[in-house]
Image (cartoon, helix red, strand yellow):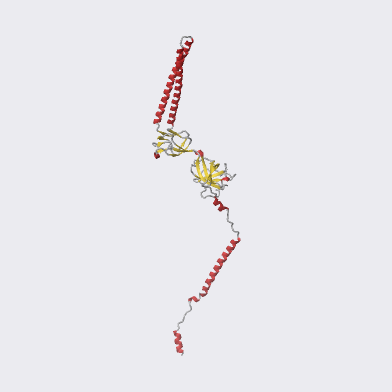
Amino acid sequence: MDDRTRSLRSLTIERSPPAGASSRPRRWLLPVVAILIVLIVLGSGLAFWLGSAIQPAKVPSIEEPSAQLARPDNAVQRSVAPAPGSAGSLIASGYVVARRKATIAAEVTGKVVELLVDEGMVVQAGQILARLDDVLADKDYALAQARAEASEAAMAAIAADLADAERILSRTQTLSGKNYATEADLTKSQARAGVLRAQLHQAEAQLAAARLEAQRYGEVLGKHRIRAPFAGVVVDRSAQPGEMISPLSAGGGFTRTGICTIVDMDSIEIEVDVNEASIGRLHAGTRVEAVLDAYPDWRIPGAVIAIVPTANREKATVKVRVGMDVKDPRVLPDMAIKVTFLDDGAPAAARPDSP
């Protein structure tokens, strides 16, 4: 019996304790740590929510949406933070314009034979800009002068005959008073003198007409020399020697109507469109600061010249003319510019020497 028991025990397999048995307590630690982390996160969120609930809630602005709805989308004026050193809060965008700008054209049709200007050239009033072919005009003027001289010579001949007729009439009257001349001789002398006086008046009128005609042809000849109407700077040259120039657009694209474009730089000012809801804040003399897009660091002082008494229905804006206190060659027509309208009494920034 004992042998059989020992034999059965020898057949049994002895198992060692599992390796994870010693780490079983650690498996219980992981859920505990996770629960602690969740509790900490929930506690932090609860504290943050309680702190935000205690603070007063921010009241939403009602004026901002209404102002945005009242302002049209395409309005040029916009209210932004004022530039440094500026006390104004109204800013409008616009362009530099020249109040005195002209495209110089010919008053007669002709071919350009000489062009004396180029872009950027400074011209004076009355300076010749171009010459047209004036051969026929010169001949017409010479012919008119010759006719005037012929009329003057004819008038001189009639005047000489009239002087002789008046002497004969005077002598005939003397003889008639002494009964040495008949009544018929006296009447004949009077009639001849009267006819010559009428012819003299006619000759004087013809001479005046001939002189006016010569003057007219002289004016036409002078129009073949195109002159500058005022002093300025040439900003565009639209014709070339050999092209046909006409005051009307005749001949389609083969005939030009202009020689060049001149701008008076002393007449440069600013035109901006201001929202009509803000136009009541402005008046003539309101101080401004202008900043060109080309020179963002250069502030140009100025003032409102006038508010144009009409509104743009589509954009709901009013045009405002602004003058600049300084004249500088860097300010060119059609440049984009922003104008800050200062509060009354706010001084404008001083102009720097360079942008």
Q: Residue furthest front?
A: 184
x%, y% of residue 291? 52, 45
x%, y% of residue 193? 46, 17
Q: Residue at x 54, y 68 (%)?
A: 38
Q: Residue at x 49, y 75 (%)?
A: 20
Q: Nearer the viewer, residue 111 or 95?
A: 111
Q: Residue at x 46, y 18 (%)?
A: 194
| Residue 130 falls left or right of residue 312 | left
Q: Nearer the viewer, residue 100 or 190?
A: 190
x%, y% of residue 143? 40, 27
Does 197 appear above or below 349?
above
Q: Nearer the viewer, residue 181 or 91?
A: 181
Number of marks in picture: 0
Q: Nearer the viewer, residue 47 or 58?
A: 58
Q: Residue furthest bottom?
A: 1
- Residue 97, can we see it? yes
- Residue 342, can we see it? no
x%, y% of residue 242? 38, 36
Does 230 appear above or below 92?
above
